[in-house]
Image (cartoon, rainbow, N blue to C red):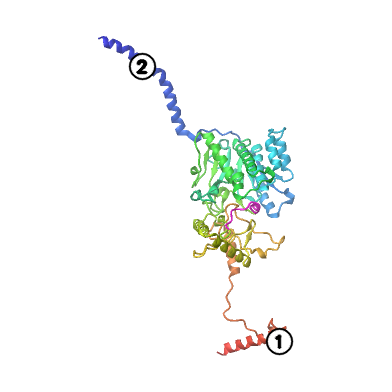
Amino acid sequence: MGSQGYDRPARGVISKQIRMVLPVLIAGALFLFLHGIFGASSYRAIGGKFPQKVWQTWKTDAAGLDPKDAVRVRTWTMKNPKHRYELLTDDNALSYVQHHYGPYGINRPDIVHVFETLNAKIIKADLLRYLVMYIEGGVYADIDVECLKPIEHFIPNRYDEKDIDMVIGIETDMPDFKDHPVLGQKSQSFCQWTFMGKARLPVMMRLIENIMAWLNGVSKKQNKPISQIELDFDEVLIGTGPSAFTSAVLAEMSAKTGNSVAWDQFSGMLDSKVVAGVLVLPSESFAAGTGHSASGNHDGKSALIKHHFHASSWPTNHPRFKHPVYGEVERCNWDPECVKLWDSNTAFFNSLPEEEQLKLVHMKETEDKKHPLMVDAQGPIGGMAPAAGMPPAPAADLPAAGMPPVPAAALPLGDVPLPEAAPADELALPAKDVGDKDSKKKDTDDKKKEAKPLPEEEPKIKDEKDSPLKNSEEEQSLAKDLKAKDVKGRDS
């Protein structure tokens, strides 16, 4: 009896404590449950519609555009008559930045100073597109991008525009190369030659500030002012190009969702998806015809734009890594067998004594002088000659897919325009069919022109007067010998 009397108060105290804690436990469990269900979709977009503006940047105003650039520009205005078209040039870009980022704008003198200081044109062009898109929003497109379908088709019907803050597309989705020493850092990226966004997006300011920090870091490392820094191809991609763009987008997605968002969420995707207000389109939408990453072709149902790449000449000032014997691995255009061969050739080269390496380099230089390398709009195309004892490499001296070979010596300066270049970081071997009908037709026509029947016998000289060798007794004697040989051959 006594022990039971002591048990009741103890049980009462425990029950009271449980009742006090129970609401907190239920609320916590409910939060975890809902967060697990909704996760990334719990992010709320900023709402509203996308600004009806199309932005492009170039060296000159519309009156000074190259005819082919003018044609591309008209596709944007003709297919999107309700959109305002704006072209910023080298002459007015600085005043734009000073106005919107100076004391009368958002007052960021550090941004204005960096833009004023920059001399590297590609870095300035990349930074300018982000500065404009942060302030204005709308659609940005490189000058050599053609609009295939109206902008209203950029967002599939199943999505509500107010739930979308930004529209981007896959450019490169080649995860098998993510650990490659040269290709790795550019093997997984979103496209930034065309994208759409609303004004004042945090991801744009994140990207701008990342670029500022990177430029200051490079300046300090090289012990030079920003105006004098020197950058190679990969440094441009990492600092301001597709790699920088992709890193900022993934970081902002992670911050908005509270979860780590990595590239594997977009790799191999066949349809669009929305993460943290960012609509990500499959590769065919903005990168059709590149010949890799399941990019399809420009006739595809989901192809929205066509990038012609003829304005992508900046790599001439910021060169890629080019092996002295085997050239640039980017010329493989992500073809696994070609990359594997390049890797094995360069590994073989690295295993040789320095004296043997120098011999191979000398042989390659001598060969290049005898047979000048072909060129495209981005400079000489590196060869893929095999190392001694190794199988022959693919014909990497050929230009990008769908373009005819152009010997460097045959190009009259200032007369014949260079052929359109392949993507800056995705130059192709022509072995792959990228599905572009125009490219196929051009290849067929080129083969017909090159197909010449071989002579079945030595040329016959009917008369000494017809011979080109008639200016001396020796030449006339040689002509008679050839004629005699021809007669003898017919008699036999």
Give the quarter of the figure containing the C terminus.
Answer: bottom right
Question: Tag 2's secondary structure?
Answer: helix
State if disc 1 and disc 2 touch (CB < 8 Å). no
Residue found at the very far bottom of the displayed protein: 491
Asked if residue 319 lies in the magenta stretch, the reply is yes
In this rendering, the answer to whether 27 lies above or below 198 is above
Callout in the foreground (2, 1)? 1
Question: Residue beneath label 2, please?
Answer: 14
In this rendering, the answer to whether 299 lies above or below 190 is below
Question: Residue beneath label 1, please?
Answer: 473
Residue found at the very far left of the displayed protein: 1
Query: What residue span does the magenta drawing correspond to?
Result: 311-323
Observer-nearest of 157 and 178:
178
Observer-nearest of 170 and 406:
406
* Number of residues whose C-alpha sits closer than 10 Å to that of mark 1, classed few (under 14), some (14–19) or many (20 or more): few
Residue 139 in the image: state x and y as whole percent: 63, 43
Residue 96 in the image: state x and y as whole percent: 72, 39
In this rendering, the answer to whether 238 lies above or below 366 is above
Q: Earlier in the sequence, mark 2 or mark 1?
A: 2
In this rendering, the answer to whether 130 lies above or below 475 is above
* Residue 417, label in figure: none
At label 1, the amino acid type is: Glu
